Image (tube, grey):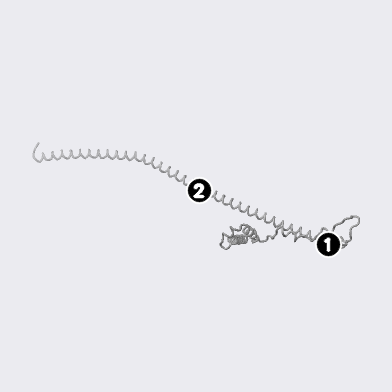
């Protein structure tokens, strides 16, 4: 294919060169018939590897020599001795050669048919491989999507667990707050009681002090 592309590029360059007339566009425009002839002749510059060069002009050279007038017969009951003739032995020998050559050509044609089928089958093989590669790509893409899904499931589960922990913490903190409030109330009550007891103790001590002072002063 690379050689064909190169040949095509050479042909295109040749056509462009011939049409351009070495950079003179006015000559081409003034002689369109010559330009068309140049373009037509440039087609012969295209060479396809393995492809025979065949045009209708080649047909005559490939035909066996045959002079139809040599077999002209005016009286079928008295054929002229000038008719081309071969002996029975020569006929059998030539016939065998033609039959063998025909078989050889047919076998050659079957070989080309085989090559054609090989190319067709190889093309189908390439198509099958291409489809397989595309399928494998889709499979891997689907695996990726499934892994993304599993990762999202795990992420969602983790968030659900975190939410449950947060809710439990909230409930626990709420219950703890109740006990904290009760504890603070009890401590406040204990502080109040302790203050009252201290005040009574102070009053009692003050009363004892006054009594002691009266005794010291001799008062009854």
**Mark 2 packing: few (<14 Cα in 10 Å), some, or many (20+)?**
few
The front one of 171 and 52 is 52
> Which quadrant of the figure has residue 113?
bottom right
- Residue 94's label in the rendered image is 1
Q: Write the residue at 54% across / 50% down.
A: 141
**Mark 1 packing: few (<14 Cα in 10 Å), some, or many (20+)?**
few
Q: Write the residue at 89% across / 59% down.
A: 80
Query: Residue at the top extreme?
Result: 220
The front one of 38 and 133 is 38
Quadrant of the image for the C terminus?
A: top left
> Which quadrant of the figure has residue 204?
top left
Q: Write the residue at 44% across / 45% down.
A: 159
Q: Where does residue 161 sit, x and y in percent of width and height?
A: 44, 44
Q: Write the residue at 30% across / 40% down.
A: 184
Relative horizontal placement of residue 201, taking residue 29 as reference (left or right): left
Q: Where does residue 181 sit, x and y in percent of width and height?
A: 32, 39
Q: Where does residue 186 sit, x and y in percent of width and height?
A: 29, 38
What separation in Å lies between label 2 and label 1 (alpha carbons)?
A: 80 Å
- Residue 148's label in the rendered image is 2
Query: Residue at the front extreme?
Result: 30
SS for callout 1: helix
Quadrant of the image for the N terminus?
A: bottom right
Q: Are marks 2 and 1 in contact (CB under 8 Å)?
A: no
Disc on the earlier residue, 2 or 1 = 1
- Residue 161's label in the rendered image is none
> Which quadrant of the figure has residue 57?
bottom right
Relative horizontal placement of residue 110, taking residue 166 as reference (left or right): right
Does 171 sit above or below residue 113?
Answer: above
SS for callout 2: helix
Q: Where does residue 108 sit, x and y in percent of width and height?
A: 74, 59
The front one of 60 and 20 is 20
């Amino acid at each position: 294919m690379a050689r064909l592309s190169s040949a095509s590029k050479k042909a295109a360059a040749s056509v462009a060169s011939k049409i351009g007339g070495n950079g003179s566009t006015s000559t081409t425009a003034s002689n369109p018939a010559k330009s068309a002839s140049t373009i037509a002749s440039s087609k012969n510059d295209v060479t396809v590897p393995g492809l025979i060069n065949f045009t209708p002009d080649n047909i005559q050279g490939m035909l066996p020599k045959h002079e139809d007038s040599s077999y002209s017969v005016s009286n079928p009951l008295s054929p002229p001795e000038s008719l081309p003739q071969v002996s029975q032995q020569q006929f059998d020998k030539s016939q065998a050669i033609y039959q063998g050559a025909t078989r050889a050509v047919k076998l050659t044609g079957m070989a080309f048919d085989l090559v054609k089928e090989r190319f067709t089958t190889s093309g189908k093989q390439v198509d099958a491989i291409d489809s397989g590669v595309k399928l494998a790509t889709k499979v891997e893409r689907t695996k990726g999507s499934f892994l993304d899904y599993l990762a999202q499931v795990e992420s969602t589960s983790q968030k659900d667990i975190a939410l449950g922990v947060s809710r439990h913490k909230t409930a626990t903190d709420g219950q703890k707050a109740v006990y904290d409030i009760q504890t603070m109330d009890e401590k406040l009550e204990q502080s109040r009681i302790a203050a009252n007891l201290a005040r009574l103790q102070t009053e009692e001590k003050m009363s004892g002090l006054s009594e002691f002072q009266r005794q010291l002063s001799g008062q009854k």
